[in-house]
Amino acid sequence: KTEALPNTQFGFRKSRSTTAALATAHAKWLEAEQRGKVVGVLGFDLSAAFDTVIQLQLLPKLEKLGIAGTQLKWFHSYLTGGYQRVVWNGTESVFLPVEYGVRQGSILGPILYLVLVADVTSCVGVGNEYNSGYADDFFLWAVGDSLEEGGRFLQIRGGGTALVLNATKTQLMIGETSKTGCCGLRRYRWGVE
């Protein structure tokens, strides 16, 4: 059921796009600024997102969506016990177990990834009305009366997943309406090394 996924996630879903994700977020930022509020926006990307998923972390999330019994056992079987090898220039490597990642090339891969990241905003303390995402790219924002209040949400706790922020693709932006009524946007690079 698509209702199980947040409406704010635009990745891998019919009639949704990166443009729609950004336009939705931008409209909410402008609306807040027109009310004289300060908007703190954190834009980030998750590093090698499909490859770093710990497969068994998906099972409790699937259970929360109501998947149980035989269906949950099927997902367990699908997610575990896989092997892969590389064939290059006619030479084959040995088979090695696949312990991380969602299987790519399968229609289930993107859906399972969306299930995994569906609650990423709860890791930062913002509600669904304050985020927009496309696959592994996210915008989270907070609205307040001051710069301090607008940036209050920047405590990322990880949410119990192995997903990692890509610091080089993470930016903090603060937008506020000036006395002239013009919206100003200041950008800051995330200083994580």
Image (cartoon, rainbow, N blue to C red):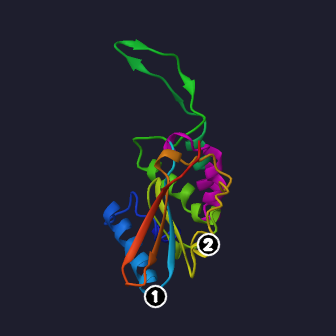
- The x and y percentages for residue 74 are 58, 48
- The x and y percentages for residue 103 are 48, 41
Earlier in the chain: of badge 2 and badge 1, it is: 1
Disc 2 crowd, CA 10 A, few/some/many (<14, 14-19, 20+):
few
2 vs 1, front mark: 2
Q: Residue at x 55, y 57 (%)?
A: 117
Q: Quadrant of residue 126?
A: bottom right
Out of 66 and 44, give the one closest to the viewer.
44
Please check the rendered image and state whether residue 71 is part of the magenta-colored stretch, yes or no. yes
Which amino acid, by three-letter code, is at mark 1? Arg
Out of 135 and 193, give the one closest to the viewer.
193
Out of 57 and 48, give the one closest to the viewer.
48
Q: Residue at x 46, y 69 (%)?
A: 8
Decide if residue 81 is on the left or right side of residue 32: right
Decide if residue 20 is on the left or right side of residue 121: left
* Residue position marked by numbered label 1 in the rendering: 35
Which amino acid, by three-letter code, is at mark 2? Glu
Range shown magenta: 48-73
Instruction: Give the number of the disc on residue 148.
Output: 2
Q: Secondary structure at mark 2?
A: helix
Disc 1 crowd, CA 10 A, few/some/many (<14, 14-19, 20+):
few
Outermost residue toward the bottom in this view: 35
Q: Quadrant of residue 68?
A: bottom right
